[in-house]
Image: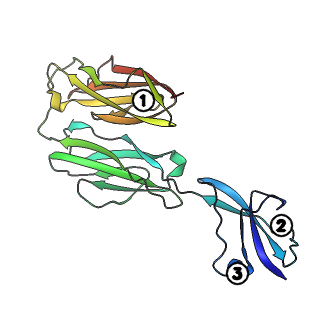
Amino acid sequence: DPVLVRIYLDDATCTAPADATGTVAQFNGGGIAVGVPSDATSTIRAAAVDAAGNQSGCSNAAAYIEDSTAPDTAIGSGPAGTVATNDVTFTYAGVPVADAASFECRLDSGDFAACPASGAEFADLPDGAHTFEVRATDAAGNTDATPAAASFSVDTTVTPPVGDLLAPDTVLEKKPPRKIKTDERKVRVRFRFAGSDETTPQSALSFECKFDGKPVDDCESPIRRKAKLGKHVFTAAAVDAAGNTDPSPARSRFKVIPES
């Protein structure tokens, strides 16, 4: 009769050293604990051992998926700066997109609540400052601990100047150095930008940003992005109350390289 059970990870023949060993009573009771690689799929097999040390063949394989890493969340589009409407819509996605199984959103000091993957809409907002937050949760139940956030203001008294055809200018007030050395897979970079226009007050300007090959998004200064190893390009363009966009956005080019 078997007295021990040996557990093997990713070993189809059960001939390598066992990854865990326990008694039959443990196996039939609470189970035998075995460590598995993080964020990976492991194939688990077991073999029985009798009192003389004879080992049986491998059991059937069981696949175990370990997922303890939460997804990131990114806001795709939405109001930025000061807007003249009190009806707003945000779109968002998980990073990576496939990792997000559901989303929760909140506005200002409200509680997080489930929101559709297609986006969140808010109507009849009062004039004033607002903050929107959204967080993704994956299929394993891991929730982004740092929700994506966007701040904006509603001012329904703002009206576009009549006949304003001149586009605003944009400047980058803060940007990363041309070369960033790191021993991590990704680094966080920060950009601060501002605009000026002949007719629209600076506080009423909005901005559009683009990072690498991603689509142009509404944004607000300052903004942070995650950059992996390689070359990167960030641009920011001011938009005035008449809808004129800076045709020559402020631009930052930089490269993330390994520390050694």
Give percent across and percent down for residue 245: 29, 23
What residue did someone put label 3 on? Answer: 28
Callout 2: helix, strand or loop?
loop
| Residue located beneath label 2 in the image | 58
Front-lying residue, 24 or 248 = 24
Q: Mark 2, mark 1: which one is toward the viewer?
A: 2
Side of 87 relative to 26 (left or right): left
Quadrant including the N terminus: bottom right
Q: Amino acid at mark 1?
A: Phe
Looking at the picture, how far across and down is residue 156, in whole percent? 14, 41
Whether 238 is drawn above or below 153: the answer is above
Q: Which residue position holds label 1? A: 211
Left or right: 37 as drawn, with respect to 88: right
Query: How far is mark 2 from mark 1, CA to CA?
Result: 51 Å
Residue at 33 percent of width and 16 percent of height: 248
Number of other residues with Cα within 10 Å of mark 2, as a class: few under 14, some 14 to 19, many 20 or more: some
Image colouring? rainbow
